[in-house]
Amino acid sequence: MKPTGSVYLILICTTAGLGGFLFGFDTAVISGAINFLRTQFHLSPAMEGWLMSSALLGCVGGAAVAGWLSDKYGRKKILLFSAILFITSAFWCSVAQTPSSLVIARILGGVGVGFAAMVAPMFISELSPASLRGRLVSVYQLSITLGILCSYLTNAWLLNIATNGSAPGFIHFYMVDEVWRAMLGSNMIPATIFFLLLLMVPESPRWLIKNGNYTRANIILTRINGIERANAELREIKETVGEEDGNIRQLFAPKWRIALMIGLVLPFLSQLTGITTVMYYAPAIFDKAGFQGGAAMGSAALIGFFNMIFTIVAIWRIDIWGRKPLLIWGFVGLSIALFSIGWSFYQNGSSQFLLGAFIYYIAVFAATLGPGVWVVISEIYPTKIRGRAMSLATLSLFVGSTFVTQTYPILRESLGIGITFMLYAIMMLPAAWFVKKFVPETKGKTLEEIEQYWKAKSLSKFHMKKVV
């Protein structure tokens, strides 16, 4: 018997969410390898930053074209392609002989991340009912945090094997002599699982409707919502899509300008929190704070654990609290957390206080900005150009992430870790103002109702100008 209703919906969204798992795993797994790579290849701070941020360059490239590709070929096909890129990149990293080869492999994996990061939350959003959309899209962020945690635990396990020197035969080279190869290659396993599960999920019904395949879309909607609700939703989507011309120039029309600005600015600001720096450099940061070897890796894993736990809090409350309050208090809370971390480093504070500050930081991010940003950018655009519009939003996120990751080693060496984190803290306050000023509340609204909101807002401004 085929699953239907909420069970079927959850299975689809969980599978798509595995794209987030791979995003998180690929982002954080290098954190355990970087110390080995720095020693083996004698990396300068600039080259270290390039090796760490090269994957993000791939993310930028992937996000830049994923929208156009997903609008043309469908959400499912692009997710399948991202899985293939993850597998290829992980294998290449495990056999790379030079930093340049590693960079190329990381860029390739980054393209896969860019595809998955853009398409997966959009895919989930397009399948979800309004009352559950915030929670189901937040599953994507939960998957990211789970991927980060699993990468830390995998690195800790491999580090333990390398320390004990217990691997047999030719595996000894990969798991002991150059354990970073096993760390970076371990992503092949979840990537293969992701590929196989994707073969069993349907295409987005909204994409099918946009392309005139109403029968297939109705079958999927019926299986999720039942016949009566599916028919009503089919009519609403067809009516709304019929008002759009599907041209990317539509995004620059006056009625979508605020949505476009939110999609470009909000993701970039979310990366100025330094979250990618913390995920990439967590073991190295704790090592610099006085934690040694396994303790540094264990502290990083603890951060990953709290990241996952507080994302679950966000999933539980986001459709009740709403998107806007979550984002405002997230930026304010992160400013306090980042200042505390920076001050602790600046004053050479206790390692216990520093660990507590990091846990507070990750708890705030995971419960607010982590899921909140993905939910907002997945629901504010019209259906016919949602893929390409989300490409711009995801591109902005990865540009911000690349900027912060590339500049962190340079700021760390020139200003010190403390001042660097305090700079991040200062940036959070104008970010909170931006959300308060421009981001609308979208909880409980269907994607079509959100679309009509922007049209009504634009029409209202037009009439006000005429009166004046």
Image (tube, grey):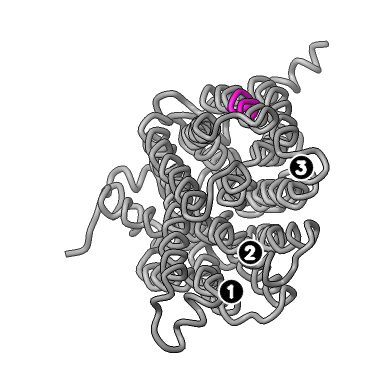
Q: Which residue is mark 2?
A: 110
Evaluate whether residue 25 shows in this view: yes
Depth order, front residue of 231/77: 77
Q: Find residue 329 and report its image quarter.
A: top right
Q: Is residue 41 above or below residue 346?
A: below
- Which region is colored magenta? 334-340
The earlier-in-sequence mark between 3 and 1 is 1
Q: Position of residue 207 (x, y in %)?
A: 51, 57
Q: Residues within 10 Å of mark 3 (few under 14, many from 20)?
A: some
What amino acid is at disc 3? Phe
Quarter of the C terminus within the rendering: top right
Q: Which residue is mark 3?
A: 252
Q: Position of residue 72 (x, y in %)?
A: 61, 65
Q: Residue at x 43, y 75 (%)?
A: 165
Quarter of the N terminus within the rendering: bottom left
Q: Is residue 111 left or right of residue 125?
A: right
Q: Position of residue 88 (x, y in %)?
A: 56, 77
- Say if mark 2 contacts mark 1, CB within 8 Å: yes
Q: How many marks?
A: 3
Q: CA distance from mark 2 to mark 3?
A: 28 Å
